[in-house]
Every structure is written in structure tokens, then in C-alpha cells.
């Protein structure tokens, strides 16, 4: 006779392996990133507004609670960058004849662009402030 | 070939764009805008405003800025939907649309409030 | 200690007898093992000497047939290429079935859900014009069979799939949604979509763009970790999400034609 048994996966399946835990943490970076983007949206509105609006936004960034929150956002954003870049060699395949560009070049290119953009942003900030 | 019955590719493309942009620039933006600039490490925050605010008065520039923020926020909402799903919380199309709607509202607010 | 002293290890094997058991349970066996023994060999020894009715699938013993997929100490593995000596430092080896599929008996699961998904992606060369329709035999041969090494290289990695279903066991999205096409089926669709000889990509993308196609995938990536053949189904799926977008867009402009791709389950997954 047949009586197939159907297993059910527990709701905390991601706790069963380090690999799954890391995946969950990666996915959860959406929370700190969302919070910062909302902060940035209000910042951009302030920058498009009056000096007073902008000064208020800058003051808000200096608030101790805000500093703590932003630290949390930065950690999340960095972990997002690290894990996102890791995936790019799997998705971007550059074929050269019968070979594919080694994964480390794709990864390296992303970090290079990251570094370049950070530098540009820093230069713009220094130049404008 | 029948017509597709979902908009998943669009949701995903916006997610991919937002995720890539966030990965490339967000850490730097956070450090510069929330730490270096407010504490005067790279110069005066007021001078920064004086220099860039004309740029922010430009409609096209502002539109691009809002679009970038929109797409980054979209990526977080899309991911959050799947976080709920992964936690075995039963979510369907209503939750998905509510999350996307929140992003759209934030994007529209940012556009209108700063226009 | 003498080198000839026999080594005994505890192996717990999942048992399930549908006519007697309500659910699977672990039966413990003491097994004398040697350096060259695989977990598959250990199971054979258990079956020979201790539990003749123990049921499990196996065939080639060399990681090419895909029959002996099991969960060994929590990891999806092929029993034939997992060696007892690697667990010498553990208290025991636990051998369980691929329980993301219905368990029929002991370590045997119902693989029909996988076969159906495999069939759904049409895993064969599709030509708009079958070779039989050419009047010139040499012309038919030239269009159907030539391929450069570079064209082969594009999809070769994805031809290595042995249908062992370890990736389905690794995938938490398969566990949450049994209708998800899953890693291997999507990887095989990718293999054919990227084969220069194939002309059926539109048909496969139509299936893959359904709610249950590629979209339940959240790029956990564990499928690619456990794949014994380095097929990288996770990478194949993400590339499919991107590759499928133009086809999806194009299909909006096609007339409402045949319904060969339709979703049984409407709504969101």
C-alpha cells in the first residue's frame, strides 16, 4: 500500500544552518536600508527647500538616537553591498570564446566602482561644503 | 503564446535596479551625508546647501534623484514581502500591493514636497 | 591501538513503513566500517546483515545516475560519494530521505513531482521547423546539428545535471511552495534556452514567467552549494529572470493564442 508521508518545514527553518542564517540576515538588510532611504527622502526634500529646512535635517542627523540608528543602517547597507556583490558573478557572465571571465574580475569590478563612487562623492562633498 | 498573467518581471527589475544602486552608493552616502557633513568634517553643511540647492531646483535633476530613491525603497519593500513569506507568514497579493503602494506614496511625497 | 582494530560507527537510518508507521523514525545500527566505504556501501551492509527490508534507491555508485540522493547529517548529499571515514569524528551518521518530496518508504521518495516539473519545461531541442520538413537532406543536417565550441560553452555547465534532486532538498522555497518549478527544472530550461540549436525559448519562458516558474526563487543559493555537478541552478535562475524579461514584454503584444502556458493557481505565491 501507499501512504506517502508529507514532512512540514518548521517556520524557523533558517536557524537550521549557518548558510540559511546568513541568507536571512541578508534579506533583513531591507529594514535598515528602508529606514535610511526614508531619512534620505526627507533630506532631499529639505535640500530642495529652504536653508532652515536643511539645517533642521542636519540637526536631526546629529541627534544621539539618530546616530545610533544610522550606525545600524550603515551596518545593514554594508552587509547588503557585500552580499549583493557576491551574487553578481553568478548573474553576469562574460563569455570570451569558450571561456568565461573568472568570477573574481566581476566581483573586483563592482568593488572598484564602489570605491570610485565613494571617492567621487567625497570629493563632491568637500568641493561643495 | 498566451499573454503573461503577472507583472513579476517588472517587480523584479525594479528590485534589481534598486538593490544594485543601494549596494554601490548607500554606504558612502550614509557616511558623507549623515556623519561627515553634519559634523563639519568635510566642510560646512550650510555652504553645502548654498552650493547645491540651485541644482535641486532643477526639475529634471530632482526627478532623477527621486527616481533613484524610489527604486532603492522599492527594492526594500520587495525584499520585505519575501522576508514575510520566508517566515511562513501567509502573504498574498494584497500585502505585496500594500508594500509597493507605500513606496509609491513615499516617492510621490518626496517629489511633490521638494518640487 | 592496533591498526587492524575494527572501527564501529553508529548509523541512524530513517525508517518508514506505510502499512505500519504513522511517521518516519530513526533506527540505529552499529556498522563496522573501512576507509573506502561510502554511506551507500554502509547501507548495503546494513541491508545485507541487519535489516533486509531496508528500502533505498541506488545505481551507478559513481555520482552520475542521480539515484542515491539523501540527507546525511542534515546535508543533501549523494550516498555513493559521501564517505564514512569523513564522519569518524562524529558520534553518528544520520541518513534521511529527501523529505521535500513525499516519503514512500524508508529512504525512497515520490519523485513524480519533479518529473512533472521537468516535463513542463520541455527539456529537449525544439525547432520551429522539424528536420523532416526539409526537402534537401543536407540542408536539414546543416541547420539542425552544427554548433561551434563557443556556442556549446555557453550552456555546457547546465547540461551536467543528473536529476539527483539534492537542489530541491536544499531549497527552502520548494519546502514552502511545492508548486515551485525548482532549481533543476529551471536550470535545464536555461540549458535549452541557451542552446544555439534550440528555437523554443519563448515557450519555456512562458512557463518560467508564471508565478510558480522562476519567481518563487529568492536566490538563497543553497541549491548551487549542494549540487554535486556544479550546475549552479541559482545562477541559471537569476539569469533567466533577466533573460525572460524581453520575452515577457513581447508576449503582451501577441494575440491571445493557444493557452499552452497557463497557471493552475491564480494569484500570488
Image (spheres, helix red, strand yellow):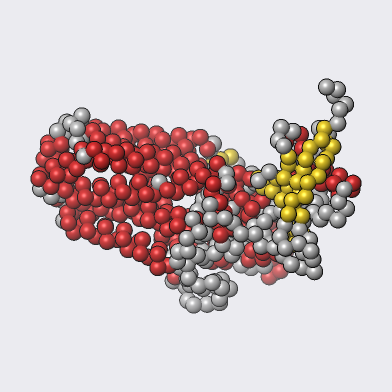
Relative horizontal placement of residue C234, taking residue C166 as reference (left or right): left
Q: Residue at x 26, y 57 (%)?
A: B107
Quadrant in the rendering for residue A68: top left
Q: Which residue is the extreme one toward the top?
A: C1
Residue A81 makes an appearance in the image: no
Name the spot of residue C187 as percent of width and height, x first.
60, 54
Q: Nearer the viewer, residue C237 or C20?
A: C20
Q: Is residue B77 visible?
A: yes
The answer to whether C119 appears left or right of B82 in the picture is: right
Q: Residue at x 47, y 37 (%)?
A: A107
The answer to whether residue C176 is above or below residue B52 is below
Q: In front: C191, or B95?
A: B95
* Quadrant of the snapshot with the N terminus of chain C: top right
Q: How many marks?
A: 0
Could you say which is closer to the camera, residue C157 or residue C48?
C48
Relative to residue C74, is residue C14 drawn left or right? right
Residue at the spot 72% in from the left edge and 57% down from the top edge:
C24
What residue is rendered at 37% in x and 49% in y? A31
Q: Position of residue B64 (x, y in %)?
A: 25, 52
Compared to C50, does C206 lie above or below? below
Residue B106, percent across and down? Answer: 26, 57
Q: Position of residue C82 (x, y in %)?
A: 74, 41
Occupied quadrant, residue B84 = bottom left
Amino acid at each position: 500500500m501507499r501512504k506517502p508521508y508529507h514532512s512540514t518545514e518548521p517556520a524557523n527553518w533558517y536557524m537550521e544552518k549557518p548558510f540559511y542564517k546568513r541568507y536571512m540576515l541578508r534579506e533583513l538588510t531591507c529594514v535598515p536600508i528602508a529606514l535610511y532611504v526614508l531619512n534620505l527622502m526627507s533630506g532631499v526634500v529639505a535640500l530642495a527647500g529652504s536653508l532652515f529646512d536643511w539645517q533642521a535635517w542636519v540637526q536631526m542627523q546629529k541627534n544621539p538616537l539618530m546616530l545610533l540608528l544610522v550606525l545600524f543602517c550603515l551596518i545593514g547597507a554594508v552587509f547588503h553591498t557585500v552580499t549583493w556583490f557576491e551574487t553578481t558573478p553568478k548573474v553576469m557572465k562574460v563569455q570570451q570564446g569558450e571561456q568565461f571571465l573568472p568570477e573574481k574580475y566581476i566581483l573586483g569590478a563592482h568593488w572598484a566602482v564602489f570605491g570610485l563612487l565613494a571617492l567621487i562623492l567625497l570629493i563632491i562633498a568637500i568641493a561643495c561644503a | 503564446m498566451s499573454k503573461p498573467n503577472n507583472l513579476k518581471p517588472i517587480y523584479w527589475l525594479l528590485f534589481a535596479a534598486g538593490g544594485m544602486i543601494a549596494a554601490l552608493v548607500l554606504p558612502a552616502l550614509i557616511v558623507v551625508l549623515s556623519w561627515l557633513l553634519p559634523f563639519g568634517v568635510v566642510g560646512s553643511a550650510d555652504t553645502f546647501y548654498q552650493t547645491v540647492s540651485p541644482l535641486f531646483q532643477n526639475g529634471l535633476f530632482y526627478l532623477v534623484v527621486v527616481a533613484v530613491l524610489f527604486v532603492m525603497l522599492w527594492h526594500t519593500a520587495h525584499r520585505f514581502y519575501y522576508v514575510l513569506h520566508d517566515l511562513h507568514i501567509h502573504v498574498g497579493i494584497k500585502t505585496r500591493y500594500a508594500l509597493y503602494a507605500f513606496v509609491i506614496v513615499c516617492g510621490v511625497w518626496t517629489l511633490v514636497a521638494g518640487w | 591501538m592496533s591498526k587492524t582494530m575494527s572501527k564501529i560507527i553508529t548509523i541512524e537510518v530513517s525508517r518508514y513503513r506505510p502499512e505500519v508507521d504513522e511517521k518516519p523514525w530513526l533506527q540505529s545500527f552499529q556498522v563496522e566500517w573501512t576507509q573506502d566505504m561510502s554511506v551507500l556501501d554502509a547501507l548495503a551492509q546494513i541491508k545485507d546483515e541487519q535489516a533486509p527490508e531496508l528500502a533505498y534507491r541506488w545505481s551507478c555508485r559513481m555520482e552520475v545516475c542521480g539515484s542515491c540522493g539523501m540527507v546525511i547529517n542534515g546535508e543533501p548529499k549523494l550516498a555513493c560519494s559521501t564517505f564514512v571515514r569523513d564522519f569518524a569524528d562524529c558520534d553518528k551518521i544520520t541518513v534521511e530521505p529527501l523529505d521535500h518530496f513525499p516519503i514512500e518508504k524508508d529512504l525512497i521518495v515520490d519523485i513524480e513531482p519533479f518529473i512533472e516539473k521537468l516535463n513542463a519545461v520541455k527539456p529537449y531541442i525544439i525547432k520551429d521547423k522539424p528536420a523532416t520538413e526539409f526537402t534537401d537532406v543536407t540542408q536539414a543536417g546543416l541547420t539542425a546539428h552544427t554548433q561551434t565550441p563557443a556556442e556549446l560553452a555557453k550552456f555546457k555547465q547546465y547540461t551536467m545535471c543528473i536529476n539527483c534532486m539534492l537542489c530541491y532538498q536544499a531549497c527552502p522555497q520548494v519546502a514552502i511552495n511545492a508548486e515551485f518549478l525548482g532549481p533543476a527544472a529551471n536550470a535545464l530550461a536555461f540549458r535549452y534556452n541557451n542552446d544555439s540549436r534550440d528555437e523554443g525559448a519563448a515557450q519555456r519562458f512562458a512557463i518560467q514567467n508564471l508565478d510558480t516558474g522562476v519567481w518563487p526563487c529568492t536566490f538563497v543559493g543553497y541549491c548551487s552549494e549542494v549540487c554535486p555537478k556544479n550546475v549552479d541552478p541559482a545562477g541559471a535562475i537569476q539569469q533567466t529572470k533577466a533573460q525572460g524579461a524581453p520575452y515577457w514584454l513581447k508576449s503582451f503584444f501577441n494575440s491571445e493564442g493557444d493557452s499552452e502556458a497557463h497557471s493552475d493557481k491564480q494569484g500570488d505565491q
